[in-house]
Image (cartoon, grey):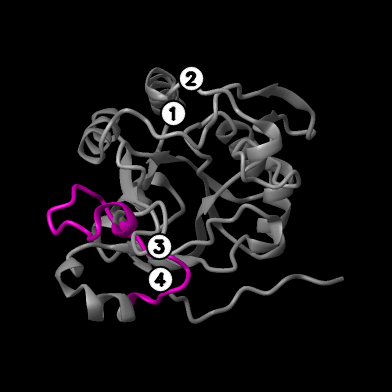
Amino acid sequence: MAEIKPYRADLHIHTVLSPCGDIYMSPAGIIEQAKKLHLDIIAITDHNSTRQVKVTQKIGRENGIFVIGGVEITTQEEAHALAYFETDEQLDKFQEFLDEHLPHIPNDEEKFGYQLIVDENEEIVDEQQWLLWSALDVDLDGLYDKVHEIGGLFVPAHVNKPASSLMSQLGFIPPDIKADALEISKHVKKDDFLKKFAYLKKFAFTRSSDAHFTHIIAEVHCALHLAEPTFAEFRKALKNEDGRFVETEPKEKLQLLFG
């Protein structure tokens, strides 16, 4: 039987592509910080775009960090949801879908910030024209169906947050919500959350930093208990299968390396 062990993971990180992402949140900068913090797994989840994922995955492989390709989607209800994909083909298919359903509202750089695509050497290679904070014209259920049609995983983001969440937009978390897991915000612990919302205990939960600045990476993180750092194992953890699971408040704290 495969040995299950904890892998430190931050499953919600933005790059310079997100309008709210700090200029230092380049793929190289993110991997450098993740390595300092002894993270094993990260996910790149820019707003409504996957275009900064592949270069981060390349740098991650070179530095021993498993990078999951993801995206933070703004639904028609203006709630945020995370989607995760295993392959380049899946990422490309979902990016085509995003391009079809993102409104063509020009980004106002002075108001919202730059939306940059940079390479592994931190050189700007492109810039996203349309505002990535905009809501897609597809609702929660439709997005779940599309993500699953492609083969991905769908996780409503920071569900208890007072803005851009299921709670803020719907007023509650539907008990029959179509989701592979739920992400709770970094301001609440899973046990405290379930005291109020016991009807959601059937779901697996994640808890991550939602980092837009390098010093926020892994401020909150989880531990994925897996046999190895792969997407197939990640999928099992979200389903609580074969002894794999997500620990939302790891006992072992991350420490910066000095010297």
Q: Amino acid at mark 2?
A: His
- What residue sits right under mark 3 in the picture? 161
- What residue sits right under mark 2 in the picture? 104
Q: Amino acid at mark 4?
A: Thr
Residue 217 within the magenta-colored segment of the rendering: no
* Quadrant position of residue 231: top left
**Secondary structure of residue under mark 2:** loop
Residue 90 locus on image (x, y percent) = 39, 27
First in sequence: mark 3 or mark 1? 1
Write the start and end of the magenta stretch as one range. Answer: 167-190
Q: Residue at x 25, y 51 (%)?
A: 180
Determine the main secondary structure of the stretch shown in magenta: loop
First in sequence: mark 4 or mark 2? 2
Q: Residue at x 31, y 44 (%)?
A: 154
**Secondary structure of residue under mark 1:** helix
Residue 169 within the magenta-colored segment of the rendering: yes
